[in-house]
Amino acid sequence: MSLNHHGATALSPPARLPDDLESTQDKIRSVGLRATPARLATLLLVQQRSSPLTHAEAAQALAAKGIDKATVFRNLNDLTEAGLLRRSELGDHVWRFEATGGHTGSEDNHPHFICIDCGSVTCLNDLQLTAGSKRESEGVGQVTEILLRGHCNNCHEPSC
Amino acid sequence: MSLNHHGATALSPPARLPDDLESTQDKIRSVGLRATPARLATLLLVQQRSSPLTHAEAAQALAAKGIDKATVFRNLNDLTEAGLLRRSELGDHVWRFEATGGHTGSEDNHPHFICIDCGSVTCLNDLQLTAGSKRESEGVGQVTEILLRGHCNNCHEPSC
DNA sequence: AACCCACTTGCAAGTGAGTTGCAATAACTT
DNA sequence: AAGTTATTGCAACTCACTTGCAAGTGGGTT
Ligand SMILES: [Mn+2]
Ligand SMILES: [Mn+2]
Ligand SMILES: [Zn+2]
Ligand SMILES: [Zn+2]
């Protein structure tokens, strides 16, 4: 269907902060980490993507720059701990990483849709439950994450 | 932890089906599987537990009966596919299994809340998204499952 | 009661994601 | 420029889970 399978619906752009080389170096240093080439490349890569990246995807992309997978992993984890990335588990036993809005942690948390056919992940902007449903869910516990699973438009089309 | 942790909201009564040897054999056969000793022991074990079981826990418990871990895994997966168990992922990259109330899951599909602390799964009756959110999700694909994760009321209480 | 065979099992080896130890290297501090 | 300490590459490792295969068995059939 759409050319832009991952994430880009017409609804509202992800509102990404500046992700140029310099401001990215600053971000890294501001959380007490050294702005090494590997770290910089990793954060830039994740920032450029509109949907969460698996370690495997990141490692493959960064291998071209001669960066080792262990380094990629350590950096993804370090950046996550530092609050520049968020790590999530969407039910398929693979960690995915995406850039946070900049502020540390769980704030700009948003729902995701994962395709059970192709595994593609789409970020959703602030899904809302109806009042009654919200009440029901709150009666059960404090919801920290909303995950939708299903067939993405690419996989669902008869042509696909 | 409360005695009746699982699904013990006003929403869905515990309603555990009989889990004696005989009815358990029947359950297994009713889904087209053979009621072997290994399979029977596995289902009985999971049914007896009040919280979801990891494969490692199940394998350890069943090793005493001389059942191999690969067999345990295959059976947990087979029983899950057959709808007698539910498999869930709490965010730590370990599958956990628990007996379903009897409903096979795919037939009467409804959202679930899963506690990332204790693993308990609560069935939500009829979660609805707001019109706008529904539209957004439908723009991405056909949603077949809604999963909420968070801290259940039992785990969220200060006393817990 | 014996028979059959697809389903199941035990065992051992394999996979894949993610981690770790360590010596070499490079960022930042002074 | 030198020193300190974080970071890197590499290879080996762990952990959760899967798979291949030969031997065994559940349960329907005769
Ligand atoms: Mn996202
Ligand atoms: Mn349910
Ligand atoms: Zn898809
Ligand atoms: Zn809980």
Image (cartoon, coloured by chain):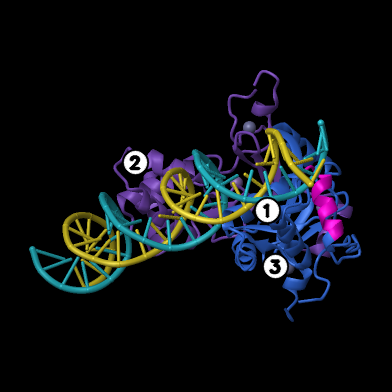
Chain colours: A purple, B blue, C yellow, D cyan
The residue type indicated by label 3 comes to Cys
Say which chain tag 2 marks. A
The residue closer to the viewer here, D14 or A22, is: D14
Asked whether the residues under marks 2 and 3 belong to the same chain, the reply is no
Residue at the image position 60 percent from the left and 30 percent from the top? A5
Q: Quadrant of ligand 3?
A: top right
Which residue is under mark 2?
A63
Residue D30: x and y in percent read 81, 31
Q: Position of residue B74 (x, y in %)?
A: 63, 49
Which x, y percent locates residue A88? 58, 53
Q: Provide the residue designation for mark 3.
A: B118
| Magenta range | B22-32
Please identify the quarter of the rendering in which residue B22 is found.
Answer: bottom right
Task: Please state if B61 lies on the left or on the right of D27 as rendered.
Answer: left
Mark 1 / mark 3, whichever is N-terminal: 1
Query: Is A108 drawn above or below residue D27 in the view shown?
Result: below
Residue topped by disc 1: B76
Residue that lies at the very extreme toward the bottom in this rendered image: B159
Q: Quick one: SS at disc 3?
A: loop
Q: Amino acid at mark 1?
A: Leu
Q: Are marks 1 and 3 in contact (CB under 8 Å)?
A: no
Residue B88 visible (yes or no): yes
Q: Residues within 10 Å of mark 2 (few under 14, many from 20)?
A: few
Q: Mark 2 or mark 3, which is nearer to you?
A: 3
Nearer to us: label 1 or label 2: 1
When the figure is inspected, residue B39 is found, relative to residue B154, above or below; the finding is above
Q: What is the three-letter code of the residue carrying label 2?
A: Ala
Q: CA distance from mark 2 to mark 3?
A: 39 Å
